[in-house]
Image (cartoon, helix red, strand yellow):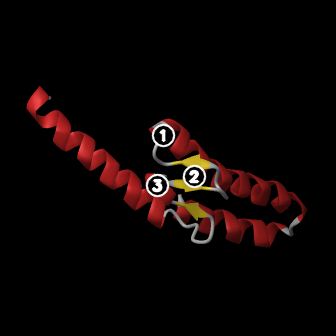
Amino acid sequence: MDLEQLPKKCTENKELRKLLWLRHGCTNNLYGDDGEMQCNRCMIDFKRDSVETIESRLVQPWFGGLAKMIENMKDMPPEFSKTVDDNLWDLI
């Protein structure tokens, strides 16, 4: 990338972060005064956190819930587990 494209890329980055902040799934816990872009539920600062941090905080709760569901399947009847296994692979 040449230096002439840098301002455009910075603007695009800010716009994408704002869009992700507004549409990431939380609606009542957003803080946006004075140009801030924070979610108090997810504890994400969409303005300052790295892409890796944002990704891990958005994805990790979903995978944690998935792991708990799989752990709970141990107590289910075998025919139920088979159905869930088949449907689970459709989600992934």
Say which of 39 and 31 sits in front: 31
Q: Nearer the viewer, mark 1 or mark 3?
A: 3
Q: Residues within 10 Å of mark 3 (few under 14, many from 20)?
A: few
- Identify which residue is drawn at 50% across, 59% down: 32
The quadrant of the picture occupied by the N terminus is top left
Say which of 73 and 80 sits in front: 73
Question: Given the current orientation, which residue lies at the most extreme top position?
Answer: 2
* Badge 3 element: helix
Residue 27, label in figure: none
**Type of amino acid under label 1:** Arg
Vertical side of 71 occupied by 28: above or below: below
Residue 48, label in figure: 1
- Identify which residue is drawn at 86% across, 67% down: 76
- Residue 59, horizontal then vertical, whole percent: 58, 50
Vertical side of 23 occupied by 47: above or below: above
- Identify which residue is drawn at 12% across, 27% down: 3
Residue 83 visible in image: yes
Q: CA distance from mark 2 to mark 1?
A: 15 Å
Question: Given the current orientation, which residue lies at the most extreme front position?
Answer: 34
Left or right: residue 34 versus residue 25 is: left
